[in-house]
Amino acid sequence: MKIIIDHLTHKYEKGTSHEVVAFEDVNIVIEEGQFVCLIGHTGCGKSTLIQHLNGILKPDSGTIYYNGEDIFEKGYDLRSLRQKVGLVFQYPEHQLFGETCFSDVCYGPLNMGLSKKEAELRSYEVMKLVGIDDEIFYQSPFNLSGGQKRKVAIAGILAMRPEVLILDEPTAGLDPLGQKEIFNLIKKIQKETNLTIILVSHSMEDVANYADKIVVMNHGHVLYNDEPKKVFAHYDELEKIGLKAPFASYLMADLSKKGFDVDTNITTNEEAVSEILHALGR
Ligand SMILES: Nc1ncnc2c1ncn2[C@@H]1O[C@H](COP(=O)(O)OP(=O)(O)O)[C@@H](O)[C@H]1O
Ligand SMILES: [Mg+2]
């Protein structure tokens, strides 16, 4: 699996007086198994960009290659692409409609043409993976907490066994407990599957822990596209565009300015603790 986003540009209401350039000349390569975080303030084009990856939206220029094939070429099988590239929209629970959680999760695999038995087996497997208890299986999804509803929605996508999982702001609108549940789930998916994951977020803190690569967008352009440490090293510039580096980056910068011998490139609290202990000679 390999995705190449090649000089992609998308404009809404092109040619009218309301034309909006959602993003312009975006180039990103995503390798199999990578965990890529797409970051940027609201309106910078993140949601529009990811909806091109499974062909829901079409670009105005440029294209996307999935395993070397141009997905916007005439005759390309977009239906099968949509099974391989699973997209979890923002507020995915708004799209739950099954009478029970289980029937909701089964919908995707059944729609792919799998037998009832195979669809149920897959659904059971992913319900377990996302941590939905057996007693909730046959309840209506509408009675669940925000975090649980979102887990059911994510399970519905995973049940199609995609190669790529895209999550658009998966913790938006949840209370701190629900957010924690979803982040723990994403970590678990990363650890227990070999999925390529693309996570859209506007919080650096959230993504520092697991991204292999961070793509920072600003006003429809890619500003940085690099490993987390290299991106966070630009924390002054990130602040100028309304993003913050993780807390640990600031702490290390301040300690270094005060003469402590610490690595200013670290990004997680865990690393910060060991740097501080090290500097203290412990
Ligand atoms: N359906 C639409 N019609 C017109 N403009 C849109 C539409 N959806 C998004 N936009 C505009 O495109 C730009 C990018 O939006 P979006 O991709 O939603 O950004 P993000 O997900 O980063 O918040 C914004 O200026 C937004 O107002
Ligand atoms: Mg968005």
Image: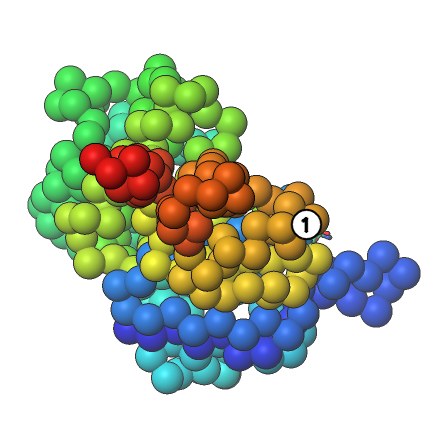
Q: Residue at x 32, y 41 (%)?
A: 279
- As drawn, is 157 to the left or to the right of 71? left
Which of these two is toward me, 61 or 32? 32
Which of these two is toward me, 161 or 139? 161
Q: Height in image: 35 above or below 256?
A: below
- As drawn, is 152 to the left or to the right of 71? left
Q: Position of residue 237 (x, y in %)?
A: 64, 54
Which image quarter: residue 186? top left
Q: Residue furthest top?
A: 143
Q: Residue at x 85, y 57 (%)?
A: 18
Which image quarter: residue 282? top left
Dot 1: element = loop
Name the residue tied to disc 1: 241
Q: Position of residue 27 (x, y in %)?
A: 54, 74
Q: Residue at x 34, y 59 (%)?
A: 212
Q: Position of residue 246 (x, y in %)?
A: 47, 41
Q: Height in image: 197 above or below 267?
A: below
Q: Position of residue 72 (x, y in %)?
A: 51, 77
Kindly identify the amino acid type of the residue bearing the numbered disc 1. Ile
Q: Is residue 88 visible?
A: no
Q: Residue at x 51, y 56 (%)?
A: 233
